[in-house]
Image (cartoon, rainbow, N blue to C red):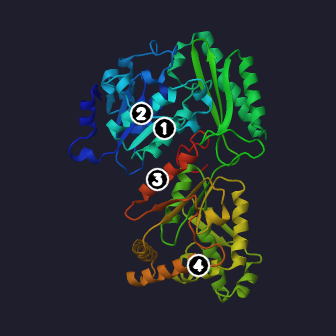
Amino acid sequence: MQLLHTCDELRRWCRPAGDLRATPLHFVPTMGALHQGHRRLIERASASLSPSGPLPRVLVSVFVNPLQFGPGEDFERYPRDPSADGTLASAAGATALFAPAVEELFPGGDAELTRVLPPPALLQGLCARTRVGHFEGVATVVARLLALVQPDRLLLGEKDWQQLVILRRIVADLALPVRVQGCATWRESDGLAASSRNRYLSKMERGQAAGLPAALAIGRRAWQSGERDPARLERLVQAELEQADLAVEYVEMVEALRLRPLDSSALPQGPLLLAAAVRCGPSRLIDHLLLMNRPPIVAIDGPAGAGKSTVTRDLARRLGLIYLDTGAMYRAVTWWVLRHGANPAVAAEVEPLLEGLELSLDLEAGGDQQVRVNGHDVSQAIRHPDVTAQVSQVAAHGCVREALTQQQRALGARGRLVAEGRDIGTAVFPDADLKVFLTATVAERARRRAQDLEQRGFAVPSLAELETLITERDRQDSTREVAPLLQAEDAVELITDGLAIEEVITTLVDLFRERIPEEAWPAPENGAAA
């Protein structure tokens, strides 16, 4: 591990010559006094983002930032142990450690300092209410470090949740070319969140501090038992903290992503934050819960041939979600219609065939999807070109869409799924936590379709013919009267031309984690749904 002290040394290390220039650079900023939570962040930073991806270079910074300490706070006595920090960072996988002096980062002193001001809306409550100027100091130093390092990925702990929300917003507002990745809080065996300030605690105070996660755990159990009133949850947690003889600074419940106060009469969809700050001996301790009304739903829409099925199946596995292949459901109905010799374009001939129709989607042991119609495996049959040519007409019938949408919504009421199709985010799951419009150019989709047909042993038309067929299907899907193909207003458009499947999946995971923290929905350790 290389040790860097000056900005010139840092710049040279961050911008190497040769092959290293193409290696991803991941950055973990800290104030030192590194603990097991930092170790976990560095380990996460040093891991490849995909099974076949390159190992990144990892930079850890150690800088006790005077800007984020207020009058009377512990800047002077904040624990500093450079030797131990270097040992832990190196063992965890850091490639370099940047440990500058204050004068190196802020050479002109306070009078010459350009400051970064977070949005006032994010500073109305939680820690910002009492730590005036703290997040301005955090934002200023992190923006300075990002300008120097120019990393591909910035890794931050979810423990300092308000800080994470603010830094994500600053990165977005300033259009900084870095992906912010939040990582779940590392905890001791009794639930206490790792913190450099824990080392201030005496043995007795350390035992008392465990009352903070214990009080929040009681709040979680109340939530799981159906309590939805924010004020009652706050009072419950505060009473438990006071019973543990902890000096309560605040207990607050807000929208997790925007830090807005809650209206108990209509809780918003998405993660909610129940946070607390207490004093225990010489230490100020913070912790929180991230709560959800239901498990997450991801809606992925887009035209035919955009690669939705391939990436959605793997995304579901990585996030521990159930894969709902709505396209396969419509293909199965089309196959059923064709098998009975009905005209796919005539609703009156299609509708009677829906009565008693049973569709099931399952995963085989090898991970491939199995589609059954009334107990018969039709997984390969529904990929026949004849089905592909007619599915858009069948899907346009209101009776078909109503029947399948009801089945899909019934599954969605329980959450914990990712679904792909043409109108998932607009018609089926308009309250999905993440909506993505996955698309590609017609030429790219024709190339993929030709490759798929060849792999399945079907005759392959010319690329020009495939482009014509895809263009016509796009026209049919986007102009049909019932639930046309349309990008939802709040969907993220992702164009997949030139992207490998792993790159698309990594982007989707990042988008998901911007909305659903790891602490609210942990990914399965083995990457497979439980």
**How many C-alpha atoms fall within 10 Å of the one at disc 2: few (<14), some, or many (≥20)?**
some
Determine the residue positioned at 63% across, 71% down: 329
Q: Quadrant of residue 349?
A: bottom right
Residue at image mark 3: 507
Q: Is residue 287 visible?
A: yes
User: Which residue is disc 4 drawn over?
Assistant: 479
> SS at mark 1?
helix
Labels 2 and 3 touching (C-beta < 8 A): no
Of tags 3 and 1, the one toward the viewer is 1
Label pair 1/2, CB-CB below 8 angstroms = yes
Residue labelled with disc 2:
142
Which label's residue is closer to the chain start, 2 or 3? 2
Q: Looking at the image, which residue sits at the far left?
A: 18
Q: Nearer the viewer, mark 2 or mark 3?
A: 2
Q: Label 4 is placed on what type of residue? A: Thr
Residue situated in front as seen by the camera: 392 or 251: 251
Q: Name the residue under label 1.
A: 167
Tag 3 secondary structure: helix
**Mark-to-mark CA distance, 2 and 3:** 23 Å
> Separation of disc 2 and disc 4 at Cα?
48 Å
Please name the amino acid that badge 1 sits on: Leu
Give the percent coordinates (x, y) of residue 401: 69, 73
Image coordinates of residue 84 in percent, x first then y, are 38, 19
- Which badge, 3 or 4, is on the more N-terminal residue? 4
Q: Foreground residue, 319 or 294?
A: 294
Image location (x, y in percent) of residue 446: 42, 76
Residue 377 seen in the current view: no
Between the residue at mark 3 and the residue at mark 4, the CA separation in whole angstroms equals 30 Å
Q: Distance between the residues labelled 3 and 1?
A: 19 Å
In the depicted view, which residue is nearer to us: 23 or 367?
23
Quarter where residue 165 is shown: top right
